[in-house]
Amino acid sequence: MESKYETAYKTISVKTIDGSIFQGEINVYKYDRLSDLFRDRKDDFIVFVNAIGLTSSQNPKTMILNKKHIIFVEPE
């Protein structure tokens, strides 16, 4: 099935305020830089796909993260 939306996924690691660290992908298609996505004030949340917790073994899943709960983002 073809998607009607443009995508440009970038692999990142994220640490949240509770100390959890996740690795996965986010769609940055409409932003020139990764930092632009996180500075965009229109959206309080980001969709994180193929996310896995680096502190525990789990199956990849889709997560919706509140940007206010993110301490840092590291591109891979």
Image (spheres, rainbow, N blue to C red):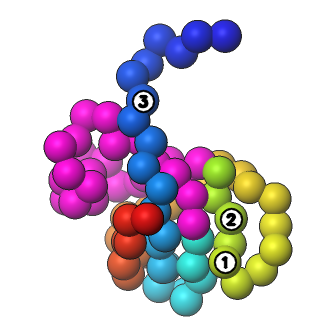
- What residue is pinned by disc 2? 52
Residue 62 lies left or right of residue 71; in this view the side is right
| Mark closer to the chain start, 3 or 1 | 3
Q: Residues within 10 Å of mark 1 (few under 14, many from 20)?
A: some
- In the picture of the structure, the residue carrying the numbered disc 1 is 54
In this view, the residue in front, 11 or 60, is: 11
- Provide the residue span drawn in magenta: 23-49
- N-terminal-most mark, 2 or 3: 3
Label 1 sits on a secondary structure element that is loop
The CA distance from mark 2 to mark 3 is 20 Å
Question: Could you tell whether 62 is left or right of 40 in the image?
Answer: right
> Residue at the spot x=66%, y=10% of the render?
1
Q: Residue furthest bottom?
A: 19
Verify CB contact (< 8 Å) between mark 2 and mark 3.
Answer: no
Task: Answer whether labels 1 and 2 touch (C-beta < 8 Å).
Answer: yes
What crowding class fits label 2: few (fewer than 14 Cα within 10 Å), some (14-19), or many (20 or more)? many
Say which residue label 3 marks. Answer: 7
Residue 43: mark in rendering? none
Around disc 3, counting alpha carbons within 10 Å, would you say few (fewer than 14), some (14 to 19), or many (20 or more)? few
Residue at (22% x, 60% y) in the render: 35
Position of residue 6 relative to residue 29, above or below, is above
Total labels drawn:
3
| 72 on left or right of 4 | left
Q: Amino acid at mark 3?
A: Thr
Q: The disc labelled 2 sits on which kind of residue? A: Ile
Res. 27 in view: yes
